[in-house]
Image (spheres, coloured by chain):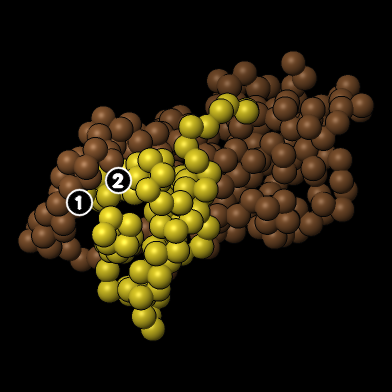
Chain colours: A brown, B yellow
Amino acid sequence: MTTHNHDTPNPYHKSDRDDAANKAIEERVDKIESLLLEKGLVSQDALEKLADIYENDLGPMNGAKVVARAWVDDEFKKRLLDDATSAIAELGYGGLQGEHVVVKENTPEVHNVVVCTLCSCYPWPILGLPPNWYKSFAYRSKVVIEPREVLAEFGTSLADDVEVRVWDSSAEIRYLVLPERPEGTGNFSEEELAAIVKRDDMIGVTTVTVP
Amino acid sequence: MSKDRVAKPEIAEMPGPAALPRKSGEMVFHNDWERKSFALAVCLSEQGLFEWHEFQNELITAIKEAEGDDPHNPSRGYFESWLVSLESLLEKKLT
């Protein structure tokens, strides 16, 4: 499990706190809370709601814009396949905490699918929160052994001669699939292209379709 | 894809050392008080008691202070620094 420890310097850090230490901190927090409730600056209701909002926040979901740019700009696409972390940063999407993004391109010969077999590593800053099925044991175990069957469950059928490659993410490497640009999108603008790319296309369980 | 977000990106996506603790995108709270401290700061900024960047600056300072010479072994956890920042900012704003 060592590669799955998120022990980059700060973000996920918790000090070694025992019950007594937590109790002492709790009292500090309660003191602030009562003071602010008394002053009418916060309400219990608002506090509860705000924590919920941020816990359930879907995140930035910038992946579709990355894909659309790669479809219209060959130079960008080259950089993306070569060093995705830097190419994505070019578009101003940061927040990757010591994680490298690797982009795998779908072609008529090769179809890529992403999984995290050990937990649920996922390129959050570009795809937002992972869907529940991505974290499920069923998906994590089955996609490695029977990828075509899993794809079929998502309604994706590939020709028999297409090779399916499954990429296992880790704390250090997050994979993202660059889907094939669908036919009939020749006159689409970059924005229009971004609008047809769905999250699941970039995990690789579906392919991009024109609605 | 373009579902409206209620969470503010300036808070949800703070970069660098102040970035919210997340595991594959999901926020990580170890204790109830961490969750409560988070909500208190966000709530006060929504109320206009301070601008978010003011809090963010306090937080960065507190985190750096906790890191000292060894960023991998800070003297306190992320939300402990968060709480220190909140206390310090309230001291300035409410007195």
Tell me the residue that label 1 is attached to: A32
Residue A134, percent from left and from top: 48, 34
Q: Check disc 2 and report its element: helix, strand or loop.
A: helix
Q: Which residue is drawn at 48% across and 56% down?
A: B53
Chain letter of the residue carrying label 1: A
Q: Which residue is drawn at 26% across and 59% down?
A: B95
Most distant residue in the front direction: B95
Viewer-side residue, A11 vs A43: A43
Above/below status of A34 relative to A204:
below
Q: In which quarter of the image is residue A23?
A: bottom left
Q: Check disc 1 and report its element: helix, strand or loop.
A: helix
Residue B40, numbered label? 2
Label 1 to label 2: alpha-carbon separation: 9 Å
Above/below status of A65 relative to B55:
above
Q: Which amino acid does label 1 sit on?
A: Ile
Viewer-side residue, A48 vs A15: A48
